[in-house]
Image: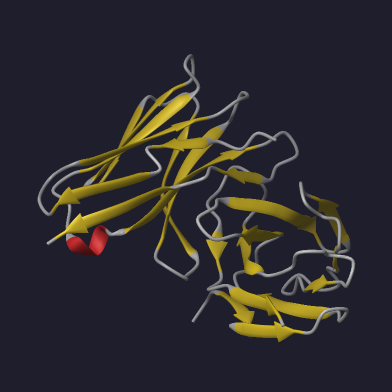
Amino acid sequence: SQQGEEDPQALSIQEGENATMNCSYKTSINNLQWYRQNSGRGLVHLILIRSNEREKHSGRLRVTLDTSKKSSSLLITASRAADTASYFCATDAARGQFYFGTGTSLTVIP
Amino acid sequence: DGGITQSPKYLFRKEGQNVTLSCEQNLNHDAMYWYRQDPGQGLRLIYYSQIVNDFQKGDIAEGYSVSREKKESFPLTVTSAQKNPTAFYLCASSIDTGNTEAFFGQGTRLTVV
């Protein structure tokens, strides 16, 4: 399986602090995506970064990609209680489907 | 509203029964996917379809079956051969496979009683 691994598994921070989570994957990719999941709900797409990109921003989100290390990081700046959720990275596979990591559970304490 | 709809939200099944989970999208997406999520776990791919009348097995297809007779619909049947079916099932769609974002339904929580 090409499934990625997020690190840490769980993260707890105070509101206003930055949250950083990492994703490592096993094989070459065309792109990497980050998704968010609130408890008991479906996933929501956050950002997509292509293999020829190194960094991408969207609002309070900053994603980096290092293809030589097969890793990506998601930074959420100035976190809010509403950011509390699980965050997953997803990579594309040779046959075109998405493979998801195991997720980072983020808790933002008001 | 455009989107992807899963039903029912909660489903209870007796051991030995087959059940079918519904997934409908009106986004005109070619690709559709079924994932299984166990508590505190990531998503594991069950089946995916890149086009109508075609589907491929994912990593954990045993005990499951799908059909893709219409572009909008990708139902998943959990058969009695699936030994541990209690889980949260997520359906997703995308314009095509791999290189675009996936849109997810709200999930179906299946419990075997």
For the point 88% across and 78% down, the residue is B16
Query: Number of marks in the image?
Result: 0
* Side of B101 where B59 appears, left or right: right
Is A3 situated above or below B67? above
* Side of A15 where B63 appears, left or right: right
Say if residue A109 shows up in the picture: yes
* Side of A53 where B3 appears, left or right: right
Which quadrant of the view contains residue B83? bottom right
For the point 63% across and 46% down, the residue is A98
Which quadrant of the view contains residue B91? bottom right
For the point 61% across and 76% down, the residue is B108
Q: Position of residue B106 (x, y in %)?
A: 53, 73
Q: Position of residue A4 (x, y in %)?
A: 55, 36
Q: Nearer the viewer, residue A69 or B113?
A: B113
Is A32 situated above or below A102? above
Which quadrant of the view contains residue A30? top right
Say if residue A59 shows up in the picture: no
Q: Quadrant of the C terminus of chain B?
A: bottom right
Is B63 situated above or below A49? below
Q: Nearer the viewer, residue A110 or B4?
A: A110
Q: Position of residue B46 (x, y in %)?
A: 75, 56
Q: Position of residue A42 (x, y in %)?
A: 50, 67
For the point 47% across and 23% down, the residue is A52
* Side of A11 where B97 appears, left or right: right
